[in-house]
Structure formats: C-alpha cells, structure tokens
Image (cartoon, rainbow, N blue to C red):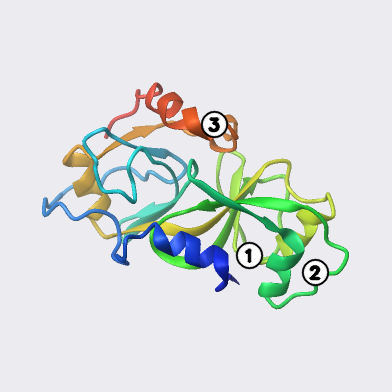
C-alpha cells in the first residue's frame, strides 16, 4: 500500500489536531443494523463542529456490521510530483511526468495513500466500490496516471475516516451526518469550495 512519510503526510497529520482515534464519539448505542452505506456520501451537518470534519463530504468506501471507512473528497491540501510520490513508495519514477492534487482523506493513518477513481482502470489491489467508482492502494496506479493511461477521473488522498462497529450509526442518529447519493460527477468535481453545499442539497436519503 502507498505510504508517504515525508512532507505531505506531515501536512495531513497537522489536520488531525493530535488525535488519532476514529470518527466522533457520541455514546449513543444503536441496536439495529442499517443498510450498508457503501458508495454513499456522508455530509457533515452544521452541528458537527469537530475541526477534522467540519463541512466535510466523505465517500464511504466500506460499511458493514464491523465498522466503516471513507475518504473526505472536498479537502485539498497540496500538489505533488507523481515521480516523487513513486520514489517515496520505493518505485522507479523516471519518465513519469505531471503533478497530482493531494487531499486530506481523514484523520486515521495520515501517511496512508488512497486513489479513489473511476472503474475504467483496474490493477492489482483495485476494489470496485459502487456505480463505477473504485479505490486502489497500490502505487502502480500513479505510474499509469503519469503515463496518461490511468482512470478518467481520480482523487488522491492521504489518511481516511474510520468508525468502529456501530459508531457511524450512532453518529448519524445523533444528527452529525446527512446521507446523500454519490456519483462520479460530484465525487471528482474539482470545485471543492462549493462541494459541501451541492452535496447537502441532495438530502433525500435517510436511514
């Protein structure tokens, strides 16, 4: 998996406010298991004041009875050279050109890299999530992107948001998150300043 322990990870680490625990603790137990939220968007409500998640839009990569994980898709933090990222991952970056925007994906493991992308490109380690969106953690995808043969659309993130069993359900019940439909147009849209507002306008799905 991608692990970048240099400056970019340090930038992402600053956004965790020194906290490495997952999600937001509410103390509310939820007995019934909801339908899976995999492939949906979690949109932080105005009441959610945790600085790590304020006005965040999170694409849920995985959700079941054991917990959930997702990637924040509206928090760009820097740009980086694809060749340098490959070299930091221990691969040859010679001949790879171009830069990539780096996002803060969440407060858990800020040195862990993920490429969220359209499913037209698949490689070892690619997981198809839902509706044409996939996630890859192997660094070879960066080489493909630098060579112009990668996915049509992509988003590179450091770190992720994670929840233990029942924790996300409790936060939703406590009013921390709205659940809205996801599609590639919104997930990969680069108008990050308005993504939260546009995602919030889709509030039609409830547990």
Residue 162: x percent and y percent?
A: 36, 58
Q: CA distance from mark 1 to mark 3?
A: 24 Å
| Circle 1 Cα neighbour tier, 10 Å, few/some/many (<14 / 14–19 / ≥20) | some
Relative placement, left or right, of 150 versus 42 is: right
SS type, badge 2: loop
Q: Residue furthest right?
A: 95
Residue 135 in view: yes
Q: Residue at x 36, y 45 (%)?
A: 36
Sequence order check: which comes first, mark 1 or mark 2? 2
Above or below, 161 relative to 132: below
The picture quadrant where one finds residue 139 is bottom right
Q: CA distance from mark 2 to mark 3?
A: 31 Å
Q: Nearer the viewer, mark 1 or mark 3?
A: 3
Number of numbered discs: 3
Q: Which residue is mark 3?
A: 186
| x and y percentages locating residue 202 in the rendered image | 40, 23
x, y percent for residue 99? 73, 53
Q: Position of residue 126 (x, y in %)?
A: 63, 59
In this view, the mark in front (2 or 3)? 2
- Residue 3 lies in what quarter of the image? bottom right
| Residue corresponding to mark 2 | 93
In the depicted structure, whether residue 167 falls above or below residue 19: above
Residue at image point 66% right, 46% down? 119
Using the image as rendered, state which of residue 88 and residue 61 is in the foreground.
88
- For the C terminus, the image quarter is top left
Residue count near mark 3 (Cα–Cα under 10 Å), binned few <14, some 14–19, many ≥20: some
Task: Say if 130 sits above or below 63 in the image.
Answer: above
Label 1 residue SS = loop
Q: Are marks 2 and 3 in contact (CB under 8 Å)?
A: no
The numbered mark at residue 125 is 1
- Near-viewer residue (72 or 15): 15
**Crowd tier of the residue under label 2, counting other residues whose Cα lies within 10 Å: few below 14, some 14–19, many 20 or above:** some
């Amino acid at each position: 998996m991608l692990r970048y322990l240099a400056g970019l990870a340090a930038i992402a680490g600053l956004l965790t406010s020194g906290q490495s625990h997952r999600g937001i603790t509410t103390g509310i137990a939820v007995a019934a298991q909801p339908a899976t939220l995999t492939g949906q968007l979690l949109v932080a409500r105005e009441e959610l004041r945790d600085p790590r998640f304020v006005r965040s839009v999170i694409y849920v990569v995985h959700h079941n009875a054991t917990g959930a994980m997702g990637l924040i898709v509206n928090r760009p933090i820097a740009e980086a050279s694809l060749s340098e990222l490959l070299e930091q991952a221990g691969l040859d970056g010679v001949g790879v050109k171009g830069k990539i925007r780096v996002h803060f994906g969440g407060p858990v493991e800020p040195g862990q890299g993920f490429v969220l992308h359209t499913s037209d490109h698949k490689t070892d380690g690619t997981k198809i999530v839902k509706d044409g969106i996939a996630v890859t953690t192997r660094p070879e995808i960066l080489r493909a992107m630098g060579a112009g043969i990668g996915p049509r659309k992509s988003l590179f993130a450091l770190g992720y948001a994670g929840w233990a069993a029942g924790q996300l359900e409790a936060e939703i019940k406590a009013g921390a998150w709205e659940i809205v439909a996801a599609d590639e147009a919104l997930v990969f849209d680069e108008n990050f300043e308005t993504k939260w507002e546009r995602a919030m306008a889709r509030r039609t799905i409830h547990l």
